[in-house]
Amino acid sequence: MADKVKQIDVASIGDIVTDAFIKLLDDEAVTYQNDEGKWLAMKFATKLPFDHAEVIEAVGNAANAAVAFSRLGLNTAMITNVGEDKHGRDIISSLHKDKIDTRFVRINPDKISNYHYVLWYKDERTILIKHEEYDYHWPHLSAKETPRWVYFSSISENALDYHDDVADWLDKNPEVKLAFQPGTFQMDAGTERLKRIYARTEVLILNREEAVFVTGGDYHDLHNLLDRMHGLGAKIAVITDGPDGAYASDGQQRLKMPLYPDPGPPKERTGAGDAFASTFVAAIAKGNSLEGALQWAPINSMNVVQKVGAQAGLLSEHELEDFLRKAPEWYHPSTL
């Protein structure tokens, strides 16, 4: 008898990239602040020594989420684009190592794969990005290939019309739940242009600054921000707030969650937000409560910043539950 095909639990949608981390020496760069923000500065028109470099394949918001889902025991697929080059082949190989289904990874002839440079200074990073202009097409998914959830995140501005394809497919598959963690271009597109995506969203995850930008709400009024996120269509609204933890609302209750205590200083912060968002969604997809999801998410986020890159610190469910058993008594949600 043929093995029964296992349903895909989550399909993660978004651009995928190879990151080349360049660790800068502390005394070869400086940071300064002005009215436009914080800046990284180095000597101009000269040769500068650096500490070391590390290349990490198959990263990006959606890819980081896919790895988190897979390690937490969810049957995961990736819907993305790569070029017909070595980096593309390495990306697919990396996804396979994390047991991620790559049948919907589109290999684009005569295109190159996304490749970004990460300037790693102390525990922060400045990322030099360039998104290749792929011809985005939503794949044909048979009934057996239809996932229970889709997780939609950062994608090129060249893919704006692709959102309509995703929305059309969601309309035809009302049983599929959508988690949306918009990237920069998606937020810049505005809520009116992406109203069909927002209206269909089961879980919407933004940081506090993003929530203000997307909704036009009051930074100092969390209830106003959560109300506005629900008003866009989200059934569950989540706001992350750096060292102040996170907040979540399901329309019935509103909760605040502190950070999980760091075991040591962070190595660098790439992927902390992705780890939180994807782990929260994984918990909900596995049937956990709002409270349970809020307890899971900060643990993976904490562990990611103890490693280099967005994926090395992502935990299995067993490892995550072990951290939860060792959590201090105060580590639990409270009413907002």
Image (cartoon, grey):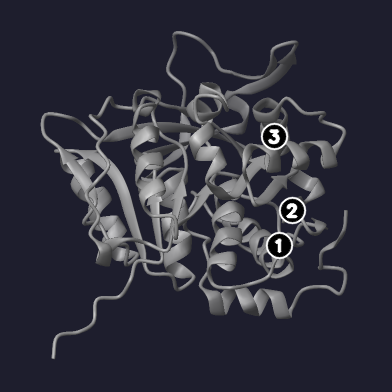
**Residue 18: percent from the left, percent from the top?**
34, 41
Q: Identify the disc placed on residue 109.
A: none
In this rendering, the answer to whether 133 lies above or below 85 is: above
Q: Which residue is mark 1?
A: 294
Q: Residue at x 77, y 37 (%)?
A: 225
- Check the image and name the residue furthest to the bottom: 1
Residue 265: percent from the left, percent from the top?
A: 70, 53
The residue carrying mark 3 is: 211
First in sequence, mark 1 or 2: give its number.
2
Looking at the picture, how far across and down is residue 78, in whole percent?
Answer: 33, 53
Q: Residues within 10 Å of mark 1 (few under 14, many from 20)?
A: many
Mark 2 and mark 1 in contact (Cβ < 8 Å)?
yes
The amino acid at mark 1 is Leu
> Residue 257 location in percent, x, y?
79, 58
**Which of 118 and 101 lies nearest the eye of the viewer?**
101
Quadrant in which residue 35 is drawn: top right
> Which residue shows up at 68% across the image and 70% down it?
289
What amino acid does circle 2 point to?
Ala
For disc 2, the marked residue is: 248
Q: Is 110 positioned to the left or the right of 292 in the image?
A: left
- In space, the residues marked 1 and 3 are separated at their CA atoms by 18 Å
Q: Is residue 242 left or right of residue 114?
A: right
